Image (tube, helix red, strand yellow):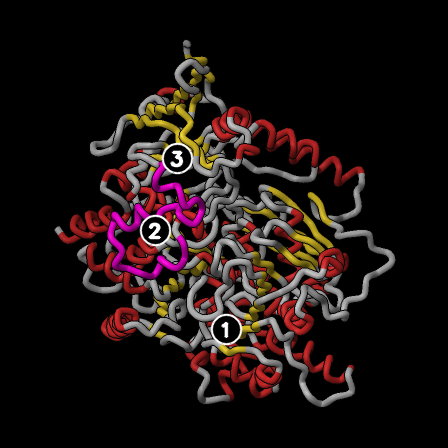
Amino acid sequence: MPCEAIAAAPWARSLGRATGRLSSRCLYTQHIVRLRCHQHSPRRSLTTTAIARATVSSNKVTGIPTLGNNHSESKKPQTLTEKIVHRHAVGLPGGKLVRSGDYVQIRPHRCLSHDNTWPIAQKFMSMNATRIEDPTQPVFAIDHQVQLKSEANLRKYELIEAFAKEHGVAFFPAGYAIGHQVMVEELFVWPGTLCVGSDSHSNMYGGIGSLGVAVVRTDGASIWATGKSWFQVPPVTQVTLTGTLPTGVTGKDVILALCGLFPADVLNHSVEFVGSEETMASLSIDDRLTISNMSTEWGATSAMFPIDKTLERWLRNKATEAATYEDRTTRERLTHDKIDQLYADPTHIQADPGAQYAKKLYISLSSISPQITGPNSVKITTPLSELAPKNIKVDKAYIVSCTNSRSSDLKAAAKVFQDAAKASGSMEIPKIADHVQLYIAAASTTEQKIAEKEGSWQALLDAGAIPLPAACGPCIGLGQGLLEEGDVGISSSNRNFKGRMGSRLAQSYLASPEVVAASALSGKISGTGVYKTSENLNGIEFGYGTGSPASPLSGLESAVEQLDSLIDRVESSVLQGDDAAKEATRILPGFPKNISGEILFLDAENLDTDNIYAGKWTYQDDITKEGMAEICMSNYDPDFGSIAKPNDILVSGYNFGCGSSREQAATAILARQIPLVVAGSFSSIFARNSINNALLGMEVPRLVERLRAAFPSSEKVPTRRTGWTLTWDIARSTIKVQEGKDGECWEEKVGQFPENLQEIIAKGGLTEWVKHEIAKAAV
């Protein structure tokens, strides 16, 4: 039947989000109803904002970037995120002010890598790079497969250490600490700077006021070789915190509540937390680190806390320690003079008044109670008071990971056992339940020494806890203590995806260290009894806006913001002038003019990287392309390999590719000879991986909804051959979908695929592109 033309539908976008348009008309309606939720939609498209090409430069990251305004548009307000990116942007046109949506070239302050350092080094060498552009930028910290003592793994660690020595890079060996803890503990991260890591939990740096962003292996190699990489400034959500944190409630409970209450609101957004001095003082730095760390699972690209008095006190204490104790290596990076400089002008470390935010959310800390997420999803959040009466038996418990295994967490967990001993009138620490295994691992050896000095570590050992190295482990499904088939686990870590911590036939819950300890003691999901419910509260207070009392003025301001947002959307959705003349996309040599194939439908939301490429394979660097193809999606659907065919077009739901930054999530799909992935939306880290590895992607929510209407989820087919076909005419920026042999046929306008990204993909990915740029610079 003839195809129905759908002209310039504003919700169909290329992976590069080329139009900057509204992702769906329904979304606009939703925000008009909410009134206070202002959605700024940047008008700049990818075709008019090119990525500045990476070149070999003599510029160094020799210190902390200046905090002064270095642009001529200072009267135009910026979010703190935009300010920080601006300070780290390279090659901006004169007078250019960085805005959400812009593609810029960045020179990060620091770049972390861990066990993936050697694969990054191999990419670096394959680019024909011979020296690291700025050896002060990278930090190497071995932390993932520390428990694996195989000859191949130990040899890899030796190679990483030798590479670090050769290039003069800071190196931390296996068992010293988890990399993100190193970055904060050693003050490689600094407030007000842009720090990246080749790991998805680099968001954690936002806990001390740094813009912490995850990059991927190829980006790491590019940064080593050139000092720079590309970055799209995310939309920014302001989250206002009100009230104060009650006794018995932790930062972990705050982020678990946010994941459940706003499950999709901050997807691919940068988050800026704000609140009164009293509110923020109720959140310790360790609480903030937990919240920022797990903002990854919330869906955020980054999550920053303010550079405030609470942070200043923490920095002052660290600076005094550094000056007092000779063994403190932080004295190289932290002094009271640097802190004075940081706080000298508050306008440089705060968002400007009147800065535009994509969204505004609020939550009352005073109304939060202990929370549990799961099983097997961070977006299923339940108050402990509702879950505890169900008497859910626990088999394994974990106080581990970069999220919640600092000395304060270990102290809180130990106190559960110490209080139980006092309550029984005994001086002897009670044992965990007979059928439970409790695993503990400190975030660093420094944090473990503090816990040992305080007696917390020994109390946990006396209770029967099994100690693990100061490193990653069960959290990522590696090493001792993994969940087995039928097990129920409860963990203070950050991710409870199906199969993440062991068997995909186990159930996994997340909670605070205190609740994990109480559950291990009782043998079932339990609380500590410390939190007392207030009679004046009826659930968590949260919503859209700032949480301030409504008034005619605030209502008018919200209406004006919504009207401004509407104007932005209307103007950005209509091609005018030069944009109209450029509607036909120029196709570069080596880039396909069109892609066509049968639709393979994976009807799932939040299909994460552990499902695409299981963690147990991630650090086995010798797996062949054929082996990767065999593994691809096996943790999601063991039958995927027998169903998928070369040249299929994979279509899935929303937030596809969320989770870790592992590049194999993209390269395994390519190994299956699947040239294009279509989703309702992508996780930003997967989008980045796709571009860097030459996998094409596109967001088409309408296609997902039509597939779901035709193939109901009640039929429970995880991988379905649909008989539908999709053709992407890249030059015309349209897709055509044929819904089966005799079904409806329709066309839809999608965003133009920009030439700068075509160039990367046509070269075979960012590695080959950087190699080409280095060769050009050498001529």
Residue 778 part of the magenta-drawn span: no
Q: Is residue 694 left or right of residue 684?
A: left
Q: Quadrant of residue 550?
A: top right
Q: Residue at x 64, y 71 (%)?
A: 520
On the image, the x and y values in percent for residue 593 come to 27, 26
The residue at which mark 1 appears reads as: 443
Q: Are marks 2 and 1 in contact (CB under 8 Å)?
A: no
User: Residue 721 has which mark?
Assistant: none
Q: Residue at x 30, y 69 (%)?
A: 153
Q: Quadrant of residue 458?
A: bottom right
Q: Residues within 10 Å of mark 2 (few under 14, many from 20)?
A: many
The residue at which mark 2 appears reads as: 664
Q: Nearer the viewer, residue 547 or 651?
A: 651
Q: Earlier in the sequence, mark 3 or mark 2?
A: 3
The residue at which mark 3 appears reads as: 650
Q: Which residues are magenta?
A: 614-643
Q: Residue at x 58, y 57 (%)?
A: 350
Three-letter code for the amino acid on which mark 3 is drawn: Leu
Point out the frontmost of discs 2 and 1.
Answer: 2
Q: State whether residue 671 appears in this view.
A: yes
Q: Nearer the viewer, residue 250 or 35?
A: 250
Three-letter code for the amino acid on which mark 2 is drawn: Gln
Q: Relative to residue 24, is residue 418 depicted above or below? A: below
Q: Secondary structure at mark 1?
A: loop
